[in-house]
Amino acid sequence: MTFYDKLIENNKNWVQNKLNIDADYFKKLAEGQSPPVLWIGCADSRVPANQIIGAQPGEVFVQRNIANMVIHTDMNMLSVLDYAVNALKVKHVIVCGHYGCGGVKAAMQNKSIGLIDNWLRHIKDVYRHHKAELDAIENETERFNRFVELNVVEQVFDLAKTSIVQNAWKNNQDLQLHGWVYGLDSGLIKDLQVNISNDSELDKVYQLNF
Ligand code: CO
C-alpha cells in the first residue's frame, strides 16, 4: 500500500481517536475559531507548524510559503494577515524560518531553477542588505545559518511595515511580532528575540499616519 492509499484511512483513525477522548470534539471546533497566533512559516514538509509547538486544531492560523516570506504584494499573505489581525484579533504573529532551508540556500547561489527564481529574488535582496556581515563569514554553513536568521528578521520588519499591522498598532491593538528559527536536526526552536509591538523601530520613511 502506498502512502497515498493510507491517507483516508489515517483520517478515519484520527477522527476515531479524537472522538474517543471527546465525543463533541468536532462539534466544538465547528462552532468557530479564535487562535491567538498567526504562524508564517516555510512550506518545507519537515516544519509542520502545529506539531512542533504542540498546538491543537483551532490554536494557530497558518500561512506557509517557500522560505517563510512576507512580500507586500503577495495577496495571499496580505489576506491571511488581514483576516488574522482584523477578524481573528491574533495577539502574536510568528515568522518561523528553519536552518537548512532550500529556498534560502538557492538564493545564496546563482543557478537558475525556473519560475521560483523570481520569488527567491526577495531573499537575494536580504543578502544584499546584509552583504558585509554575510560575506565576512568564511564557513559556508555558518554563513547559510546566519542568512536564514537575517531573512527571518527582515520578514518580521516587513510585517511591521504593512499597513495592516501599523493600523492595528495605531488602534492600540495588542499585537506582537516575533522571529524564530527551527532546527531540522534538533527539533528545537531558536527565538531570535526580534519582538516588535510598535512602529518606533521602523525607519521613519515606513511609519504610516492614519
Ligand atoms: Co524552507
Image (tube, rainbow, N blue to C red):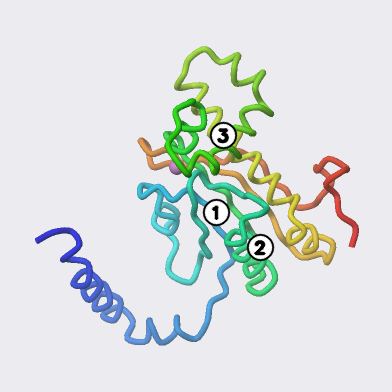
Q: Which of label 3 and label 2 is nearer to you?
A: 3
Q: Within 10 angstroms of label 1, few (less than 14), some, or many (20 or more) residues?
A: many
The x, y position of residue 197, in whole percent, is: 75, 52
- Give left or right: position of 9 versus 108: left
Q: Is residue 206 above or below residue 3?
A: above
| Tag of residue 40 | 1
Q: Tell me the amino acid under the disc marked 2.
A: Lys
Counting the numbered discs, the total is 3
Helix, strand or loop under label 2: loop
- Give left or right: position of 8 versus 181: left
Q: Which residue is identified by label 3?
A: 149
The residues bearing labels 3 and 2 have C-alpha atoms spaced at a distance of 23 Å
| Tag of residue 91 | 2
- Residue shown at the point (57%, 61%) measured from the top left: 76
- Residue shown at the point (47%, 48%) measured from the top left: 42
Q: Within 10 angstroms of label 3, few (less than 14), some, or many (20 or more) residues?
A: many
Q: Tell me the amino acid under the disc marked 3.
A: Glu
- Residue shown at the point (66%, 63%) measured from the top left: 91
Q: Tell me which numbered mark, 2 or 1, is placed earlier along the sequence.
A: 1
- Give left or right: position of 71 versus 60: right
Q: Check if mark 1's residue and mark 3's residue have beta carbons within 8 Å.
A: no
Q: In this view, does 179 lie above or below 113?
A: below
